[in-house]
Image: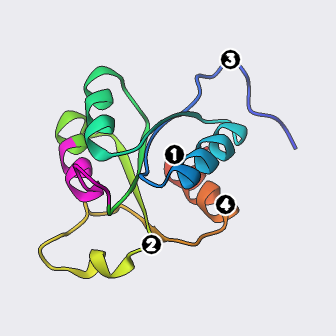
């Protein structure tokens, strides 16, 4: 098995997750998997960072205070139409609401999920 060449820039993930323990776990695990991760506790903070930096993927919870993940994804898509988006949620029923539609082609992983499934889905989305 060959390692990824170190001269290639790391793929950058913006993580928005309001659960502190989940956020910390995902940040550590995705960093260990080779990604550069910036993590925020809510959609508003994540949106502010998106205005300042470029990211490859937005990984966001759907149900969060201040700005939910659907609104964050909508605004993120306006800032960077090429940004890939993936949702993680413990409230899968939220995604079924006709008034709250996630962006097309944005995968939704329901909590709890296995880390290997998340990394596999991210690798697939980012062509890693």
Calculate the distance from the C-alpha at mark 4 to the C-alpha at mark 2: 15 Å
In the rendered image, residue 67 lying in the magenta stretch gets the answer yes
Taking the spot 38% from the left edge, 78% from the top edge, the residue there is 92
Q: Where is residue 11 in the image (x, y as percent from the top left)?
A: 54, 33
> Horizontally, is 70 left or right of 118 in the view?
left
Q: Earlier in the sequence, mark 2 or mark 3?
A: 3
Element class at badge 4? helix
Circle 4 sits on which residue? 115
Spatial separation of the CA atoms under disc 3 and disc 4: 26 Å
Q: Local crowd at mark 1 within 10 Å, few (<14), some, or many (≥20)?
A: few
Q: Which of marks 3 and 4 is nearer the N terminus?
A: 3
Asked whether, in this view, residue 55 is left or right of residue 78, the answer is right
- State yes or no: discs 2 and 3 in contact (Cβ < 8 Å): no
Of the two numbered discs 1 and 4 on the same chain, state the one appearing first in sequence: 4
Q: Give the range drawn in magenta.
A: 64-75
Q: Does the magenta stretch include residue 73?
A: yes
Identify the residue position indicated by label 2 in the image.
90
**Which comes before the other along the chain, label 4 or label 2?**
2
Per the rendering, the mark at residue 7 is 3
Residue to which mark 1 is pinned:
126
**Rendered residue at 32%/63% (across/down):** 63
């Amino acid at each position: 098995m060959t390692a990824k060449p170190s001269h290639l820039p790391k793929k950058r993930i913006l993580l928005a997750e309001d659960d502190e323990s989940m956020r910390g776990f995902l940040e550590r695990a995705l960093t260990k998997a080779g990604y550069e991760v910036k993590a925020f506790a809510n959609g508003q903070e994540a949106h502010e960072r998106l205005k300042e930096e470029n990211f490859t993927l937005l990984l966001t919870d759907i149900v969060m205070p201040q700005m939910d993940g659907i609104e964050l994804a909508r605004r993120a898509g306006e800032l960077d139409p090429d940004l890939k988006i993936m949702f993680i949620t413990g409230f899968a029923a939220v995604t079924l609401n006709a008034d709250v539609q996630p962006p097309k082609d944005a995968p939704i992983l329901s909590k709890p999920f296995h880390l290997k499934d998340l990394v596999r889905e991210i690798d697939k989305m980012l062509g890693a």
